């Protein structure tokens, strides 16, 4: 069993350069975090990367996270980054208007600057950034809706990077920016693997599922016991309960490990946050 998460995003310098080139074209940044790992999934040098750009942090997938812990993280994020933080989900459109209104309010300095210079008003340019699989594309699809009216490619933007008018005062870059980073912190890498933000080739399912169960046993034992109908929170017991047995009467660890990870990622075990705010 491999107990190490291999974090190789590849071409880090190139990816970071491309992201910075995109950032030069925008007024407001929507940085998306997975609400279940708001610390482990955050980019440590976020402010250094984005500079003095106006920013809004979205705690996405909040519908499968622990709401009490999420509210604490929301406050911590707003204090740390001095920017608004919204709770969003990838499953419905209810928060779309809230995001739009927050963009317009956050962009007030941009409108005022244009006005003070005697320039004609123009739409605010917005970009969505974040780690892999935090729901960036879902946020973009939500904001663009079904009416993806192209406003034309801006100078220096490739043909595949188009701006979409999502509001009469907002243009959105329809390709997300993936934050590149070297992840030397195995605890963070492990939790990124738990929420599927790391390639499956980078880790062993049995190890990650086992570590996930340790966290769940510490913070959410009753939810796990009730969902799997077990007394002991182990991969072996869950496999035995489902009668998933391989040769020689041994529990099917491989199948059960993937099953546990999928259940967690789909929110079936319950509303769970892996990063406890009291631990950081």
Image: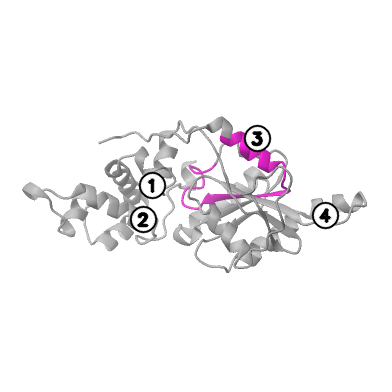
Q: Mark 2 and 3 residues: CB-CB less than 8 Å, in contact?
A: no
Residue stretch in magenta: 15-42
Residue 137 at x, y = what percent? 54, 55
The disc label shown at residue 48, or none:
3
**What residue is drawn where x is 68% and y is 42%?**
23
Dot 1 or dot 3: first in sequence order is 3
Q: Mark 1 and 3 residues: CB-CB less than 8 Å, in contact?
A: no
User: Extreme left residue here?
Assistant: 248
Q: Is residue 260 left or right of residue 230?
A: right
Find the distance from the CA under tag 1 to the CA under tag 3.
Answer: 27 Å
- Asked if the stretch drawn in magenta spans residue 78, the answer is no
Residue assigned mark 4: 111
Q: Mark 4 and 2 residues: CB-CB less than 8 Å, in contact?
A: no
Q: Which image quadrant is residue 102 in? A: bottom right
The disc label shown at residue 194, or none:
1
Query: Label 1: how many residues lie within 10 Å, few (<14), some (14-19) or many (20+)?
Result: many
């Amino acid at each position: 069993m491999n107990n190490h998460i291999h974090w190789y995003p590849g071409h880090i310098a190139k990816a970071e350069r491309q992201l910075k080139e995109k950032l030069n074209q925008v007024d407001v940044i929507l940085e998306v975090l997975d609400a279940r790992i708001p610390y482990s999934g955050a980019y440590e040098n976020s402010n250094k990367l984005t500079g003095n750009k106006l920013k809004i942090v979205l705690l996405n997938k909040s519908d499968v996270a622990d709401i009490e812990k999420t509210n604490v993280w929301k406050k911590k994020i707003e204090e740390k980054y001095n920017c608004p933080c919204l709770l969003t989900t990838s499953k419905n459109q209810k928060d779309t208007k809230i995001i739009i209104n927050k963009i317009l309010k956050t962009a007030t300095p941009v409108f005022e600057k244009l006005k003070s210079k005697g320039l004609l008003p123009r739409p605010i340019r917005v970009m969505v950034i974040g780690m892999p699989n935090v729901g960036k594309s879902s946020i973009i699809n939500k904001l663009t809706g079904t009416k993806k009216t192209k406003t034309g490619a801006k100078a220096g933007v490739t043909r595949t990077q188009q701006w979409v008018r999502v509001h009469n005062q907002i243009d959105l870059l329809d390709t997300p920016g993936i934050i590149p980073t070297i992840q030397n912190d195995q605890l963070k890498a492990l939790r990124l693997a738990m929420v599927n933000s790391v390639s499956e080739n980078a880790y062993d399912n049995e190890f990650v599922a086992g570590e996930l169960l340790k966290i769940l046993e510490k913070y959410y034992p009753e939810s796990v016991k009730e969902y799997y109908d077990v007394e002991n929170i182990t991969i072996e017991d869950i496999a035995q309960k489902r009668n998933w047995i391989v040769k020689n009467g041994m529990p099917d660890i491989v199948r059960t490990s993937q099953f546990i990870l999928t259940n967690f990622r789909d929110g079936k075990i319950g509303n769970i946050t892996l990063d406890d705010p009291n631990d950081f």
